[in-house]
Amino acid sequence: MNSHDNGGRDLPRDDDDILVLRQPDDWHVHFRDGAMLAFAAEHTARQFARAIVMPNLVPPVTTVAAAAAYRTRILEALPADHRFVPLMTAYLTDEIDPAEIAAGFRDGVFTACKLYPAGATTNSAAGVTDVRRIWPVLERMQAIGMPLLVHGEVVSPDIDIFDREAVFLETVLAPVLADFPGLKVVLEHITTEDSVRFVAAAGANLAATITAHHLRLDRNALFEGGLRPHAYCLPVAKRRRHKEALRKAATSGDPKFFLGTDSAPHQKHEKESACGCAGIFSAPTALESYAQTFDEEGALDRLEAFASVSGPRFYGLPLNEGTVTLRRAPQQVPELMTGDGVRVVPFHATETLAWRFAGRGGQATDDNGPS
Ligand code: DOR
Ligand code: ZN
C-alpha cells in the first residue's frame, strides 16, 4: 500500500491554504450522558461522520439493550440535521456473557468490545480484573470477527505510572495475541515508542489509535510553570522521545496507525481539583489539531490516510463518500466552553491554531468554528 493512500478518491487540487479530505471518522471518543452528552456529542458530529463511542458510563454499557438505548440518547442529543453515526461498544467485565456480545454484534448494535483493566482509568472499576477471565469472550470475538479495543495499561501500584503501557504489552497484549492470532485488536491511545514498535511489528490484526493531544504534549506539559490539570489524561503523556515516535508513526502513512481522539470531557471543577479527573476534551478542534501536527511534520498529504482511510479499512467498514474542508486561517480556541449546566476547558484553550474547519463538502465555508 502506498503512503499517500486516499482510498481511490479523485483529489480536487488542494492549494496550500485549502485542504479537502475524504470525510473522516473518530475511532475513539467519550460522549458521557445527560447534560454532558448534550454538550459534547455535537462537536464530534460536526467534524466526523462516525465515531466509536466508549462505554465507560455509570453504570457501564454491558448489555445490548443498554447500548441500543445509549445510541438513541446520542442521536436525540444531536441537532436535527446531523449526519453522524455513533458506533457502539460493549464494556467488558469479568462476568460478561459471550452470547450477549455476539448477539449485539450480529444485530449491528455493538461494533466492538472495550477492555478496561479494572482501576486503570475513569469509570473502570467494573472492568476486567484478569484478562484470563475473559478468554471465552475473546474466543468468541475472534470467531465472529469482532474487534477488541484495549486500554493498554497495567494497574499494579508497583509499576511506575510511566511504565504501565510498556509492561502491558509484554504481560497482557502479547499473550492475548499469541492465543488469539486471528483476533482484531486496536491498542487505543498509544503513548510510547514501545507501542509504536510493537504494533508496527505485529500482524495485520493489530492496529493503534493516536490522539491529537499525545502528538503535541509530553510529560513536561503537566508541570509547565505549575500543575496543569488540563494536560492530564490517561495514559499519561510520556517523555519527548515518545511523542516524537508517535508523530512519526501517525504521519508515516502506515495503515496500522489511525485517528482516535479519546476526546474525554470533564467539568472544569472536576479537573481543577485536589484529585482531578483524567481526560482532554479535544473534539471541538480535533481536525485542526491533527492538521497542525501533520503540517509541522511536512505530511499534510498523509492526513487523509490517517483520518479517513486506515480506520474504516481496519474495521472492515466502507469509506465515507463526502469530504471536509480545512482552511489555513488562524483561530483562537476559547478559554472555556459552556452548555446547559456544563463548563469545560477544551484542548488548546486560548491557543491560536493555524487551521480552521470549514465544514463538510468541498466548497463549504459556512462553519464559524466552535462556540
Ligand atoms: O484520559 C482519559 N480519559 N483516559 C481514559 O482512558 C478515559 C478517559 C475518560 O473517560 O475520562
Ligand atoms: Zn478513552
Image (tube, rainbow, N blue to C red):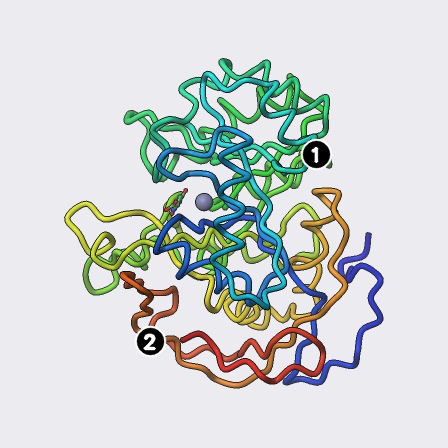
Q: Amino acid at mark 2?
A: Thr
Q: How many marks?
A: 2
Residue 73 vs residue 246, the one in the foreground: 73
Q: Quadrant of ligand 2?
A: top left
Rendered position, 256 above or below 170:
below
Where is residue 204 drawn, in percent x and y? 73, 36
Relative depth, front residue between 107 and 278: 107
- Residue pointed to by mark 1: 205
**Residue 87 position (above or below residue 253):** above
Q: Secondary structure at mark 2?
A: loop
Disc sitting over residue 350 in the figure:
2
Which of the two residues, 93 or 217, is positioned nearer the viewer here? 93
Q: Left or right of 328: which side holds 11?
A: right
In depth, the one of 109 and 194 nearer the eye is 109
Q: Is residue 289 above or below residue 100?
A: below
The percent position of residue 275, horizontal first and vertical second, equals: 19, 45
Which residue is located at x 68 percent, y 33 percent?
107
> Badge 1: how crowded within 10 Å, few (<14), some, or many (20+)?
some
Q: Tell which circle, 2 or 1, labels the residue nearer the N-terminal end.
A: 1
